[in-house]
Image (tube, rainbow, N blue to C red):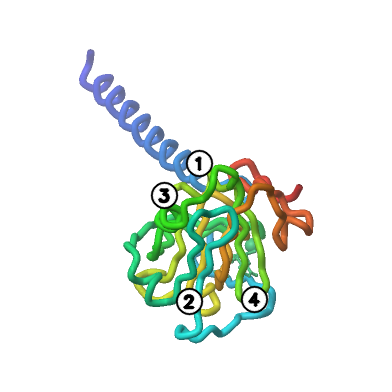
Amino acid sequence: MSKARYIAAKEAWARKQVARGVTARSEAAAERLPPGQKLTTGFPVLDLGIKPEIPLEEWTLALLGEVAQPLTLDWAALNALPQVEDVSDFHCVTTWSKFDCQWGGVAFTELYERVQPTAAAKFVYFTGYDGYTTNVPLAQCLDEDVLIATRFEGKPVSREHGGPARVIMPKLYAWKGAKFVKEIHFLAEDKLGFWEVRGYSNQADPFKEERYA
Ligand SMILES: Nc1nc2c(c(=O)[nH]1)N[C@H]1C(S)=C(S)[C@@H](COP(=O)(O)O)O[C@H]1N2
Ligand SMILES: [Mo]
């Protein structure tokens, strides 16, 4: 092989590597961003026009329904439970997504173990202090990234983002995560929440674009 041809071949090979790398990166980004979503670097606020103010000394989280051990946690009791940190992506049905949200709080599974749901428990219905409700199959609540979050980026979750405590359900559209969480009901039968009765999908998988029922 002449030197010129050798250099040309090397250059072509290098270009191919670059192209392959770029392709791999854009494919990875495309896979991470669900269809129809746009990446945002801000953090929009979505609520029902109510941002309830709950003094920490009055705040409680009740776990009830199909459980052997109903439990009501006050703020100190929630914070005394083992704490976890998790970084996850956030997908709102109104087409914005936010990558790498850093949440801290108590894993849903931690509460699950304490209340001991009965064999009949198959669904979970969450209520918020603003009257909001949403529902998720119990099996999906047991993913390790499902949290009762009290911290965002190391600081308390702000009131506008659902503090003192909000549910984070990263694998589903964000309406499945109740802000200002107040009660967690374990149910034998599914019960549609606020947006679910108004035509939103009951599955809500962003990667399947399950926006509306
Ligand atoms: N209690 C409560 N939780 C809620 C809502 C709400 O109105 N009330 N809105 C939901 C919707 S539609 C979205 S997209 C996210 C928005 O969370 P953010 O305001 O922190 O972005 O909260 C979800 N949880
Ligand atoms: Mo939303």
Q: Earlier in the sequence, mark 3 or mark 4?
A: 4
Q: Earlier in the sequence, mark 1 or mark 4?
A: 1
Position in image of residue 123 (x %, y %): 61, 49
Tell me if residue 173 can be seen.
no
- Identify the element where label 3 is drawn: loop
Residue at point 53% right, 73% down? 161
Mark carried by residue 130: 4
Residue at point 60% right, 58% down? 65
Q: Marks 3 and 1, how far apart in space? A: 21 Å
Give the residue furthest to the right. 198
Q: Amino acid at mark 1?
A: Glu
Q: Earlier in the sequence, mark 1 or mark 2?
A: 1
Give the residue furthest to the front. 68
| Residue count near mark 3 (Cα–Cα under 10 Å), binned few <14, some 14–19, many ≥20 | some
Q: Is mark 1 within 8 Å of ligand 1?
A: no
Pointer 2 residue = 164
Q: Earlier in the sequence, mark 3 or mark 2?
A: 3
- Identify the element where label 2 is drawn: loop
Q: Are marks 3 and 2 in contact (CB under 8 Å)?
A: no
Give the residue furthest to the left. 3
Q: Is mark 4 within 8 Å of ligand 1?
A: yes
Q: Marks 1 and 2, how far apart in space? A: 33 Å
Q: Earlier in the sequence, mark 4 or mark 2?
A: 4
- Identify the element where label 4 is drawn: loop
Position in image of residue 45 (x %, y %): 59, 72
Pointer 3 residue = 144
- Identify the element where label 1 is drawn: helix
Position in image of residue 195 (x %, y %): 72, 60
Q: Marks 3 and 2, how far apart in space? A: 21 Å
| Residue count near mark 1 (Cα–Cα under 10 Å), binned few <14, some 14–19, many ≥20 | few
10 or 181, nearer to the observer: 181
Mark toward the viewer: 1 or 2: 2
